[in-house]
Amino acid sequence: MKTKKIVIAVLTCVLLSGIVPLPVNAASSTYKQYNAYTSKGIKIGAYRIKWHYKTGLYSIKGKKKVKIAGTNSNAVVLSNKKKLYYSVKKGKKYYIYSSKMNGKNKKRIAKGKLLYSDSYINLEYGYGNKVYFVTELDPGTLKVVNVKTKKIKRLAKNVTSTTRSGNYLYLDPYSGDAYGGQPLRFLSTKNDKVKTISKCANYTVRGKTLYYSNYKKTLKKGFLVDVIRCKRNGSKKRYLAKNIKVICTWNISSKGMNYMDQNYTEKYYKFK
């Protein structure tokens, strides 16, 4: 019973976790993620991109509305305000396309197979000639496709989504595995090499600084953690707190963190 309570609490903390990515200027080589499933669509540059499960994906500018893809497309798209990337599913097959913001000049840049007809594909980030995406779900696989060569490379398993900060992508695992900690992994979009910083209860990126709580030991109730700050690639570590007994932690900063104590009470821990 206690174990179930801890698992539920940890999952709750995962949902409460605050990720604060580094603001990045909209450079032509950077393709940010947008969710177009809103009532009015999402504004991207001079266009408004809208998706609905009954009608599909549309591009809107003024009174002109152009259909880009059908209902088998995904609401999540990538864009640099001049170009659009979007995905489509057909049974167990997936396709990734690029087009202008008005839907013209459509090109297929990737295709592949999924395990099941109801499997998942989500575009995460685009940089230069590379598009990062996740297939399957709980857990999924992070992949990257080279837009020019159309070659797809598998980068990491057990990835449900990613969190970006600058040229770094942090690989967020399946939340159902949160009990007992997860490896804190990241990759640089410059070389696509996945590195593990540590096992952790939670992490927060603020500007060019990474904060995380590191699992040391599983207790009868919760965990014993150290809280660390470092550069985004895990270098130059500095301890902010040691041997803290928690169920989970979230929203870590240079001043303190939110945590749930062993009595399942939410509290704030101020660093000395």
Image (tube, grey):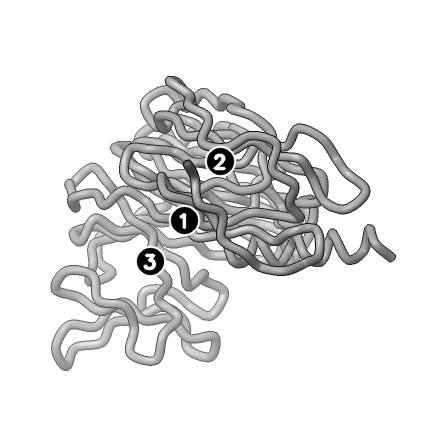
The earlier-in-sequence mark between 3 and 1 is: 1
Residue at the disc numbered 3? 34
Residue placed furthest toward the right: 1
Q: Which of the pair 203/220 is nearer the observer?
A: 220
Distance Cα–Cα, label 3 vs label 2: 27 Å
Residue 177 visible in the picture? yes
Classify residue 264 as left or right of residue 101.
right
Quadrant in which the N terminus appears: bottom right
Rendered residue at 26%/51% (across/down): 79
The earlier-in-sequence mark between 1 and 2 is: 1
The dot on residue 41 is none
Q: Which of the pair 9/238 is nearer the observer?
A: 238
Q: Residues within 10 Å of mark 3 (few under 14, many from 20)?
A: some
The dot on residue 212 is 2
- Percent position of residue 267, x then y: 54, 56
Rendered residue at 55%/47% (across/down): 249
Q: Nearer the viewer, mark 3 or mark 1?
A: 1
Badge 1 amino acid: Ile
The earlier-in-sequence mark between 3 and 2 is: 3
Badge 2 amino acid: Tyr
Rendered residue at 81%/55% (across/down): 4
Distance Cα–Cα, label 3 vs label 1: 16 Å
Distance Cα–Cα, label 1 vs label 2: 11 Å
Circle 1/circle 2 CB separation < 8 Å: no
The dot on residue 19 is 1
SS under mark 1:
loop
Quadrant in which the C terminus appears: top left
- Percent position of residue 108, x then y: 37, 45
Circle 3/circle 2 CB separation < 8 Å: no
